[in-house]
Amino acid sequence: METREQIITYWICPAIPARNEFASIIGDLARRFDAPVFEPHVTIYSADAANEKPEVALERVLKNRKRYQLSIRGLNFSGEFTKTLFVQFAPNPALARLSEDLRRASASPSDYELNPHLSLIYKEMDEKTKRRLAASITLPFDEVIFDTVKAILSRAEIKSRKEVEAWRVVAERKLTE
C-alpha cells in the first residue's frame, strides 16, 4: 500500500442537543442535494495509518480530558469538497493542545494544521448555491459542547461520496464532564 493512501483522522463530535441539530441539517442537505450522510464532527488531527495505533493514542492522550466548548464564528463555504459548506469555530487553545498531543503520540507525526470547522455537506456545487445555503441556515446556539473523540480510518484524499461512505470508526472515547 502506498504511503498516505490511508489515514487515521481524529475527530471531536458534538454532544446532544447540538449533535442532533447538526445531524438533522446534514441529513436534510444530503437528501436535497443527493450527497453523503456523515456524522457531525470537527477534525482535530490526521496521520498516516500505516503505523498508527489509535486506541493507544486515545487512551494516552485523553486521560483526564474534559469536554470541549467551541464558539461558532459563522457559516462559510469553499471550493474544497470536504469544506463545501461548514460551521467555522473560533480558535480554542485547549483544542490546539489536544491536536498537538495527538501529533506527539502519533507513530508518524504529520504537519496537520488545526482549523476547527464542522462540515454540513460534501458536494460539488456552484458558488451561488453555497452562498444561498449559508445564508439560509440559522443555528439555535452560539457555542457547541463536544464530548467524544473518535479515530476514523479513511482514504488520504476525500473527493467523492464513495470515499465519505467508506469511513470507519476504529477507536472512540468519551470525554469527562
Image (tube, rainbow, N blue to C red):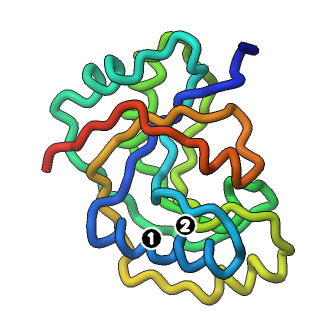
Q: Residue at x 52, y 51 (%)?
A: 116
The relative height of residue 61 versus residue 129 in the rendered view (above or below) is: above
Looking at the image, residue 85 sits to the left or right of residue 114; the answer is right
Percent x, y of residue 76: 65, 70
The relative height of residue 84 versus residue 132 in the rendered view (above or below) is: above
Q: Secondary structure at mark 2?
A: strand
Looking at the image, residue 176 sits to the left or right of residue 94; the answer is left
Q: Secondary structure at mark 1?
A: helix
Looking at the image, residue 93 sits to the left or right of residue 165; the answer is left
Looking at the image, which is closer to me, 26 or 104?
A: 26
Cβ–Cβ below 8 Å for labels 2 and 1? yes
Which is more N-terminal, label 1 or label 2?
A: 1
Disc 1 residue type?
Answer: Phe
Q: Residue at x 77, y 48 (%)?
A: 159
Q: Judge the density around disc 2: few (<14), some (14-19), many (≥20) Cα neighbours within 10 Å.
A: many
State the mark number for residue 22: 1
Q: Residue at x 75, y 55 (%)?
A: 81
State the mark number for residue 87: 2
Percent x, y of residue 22: 44, 70
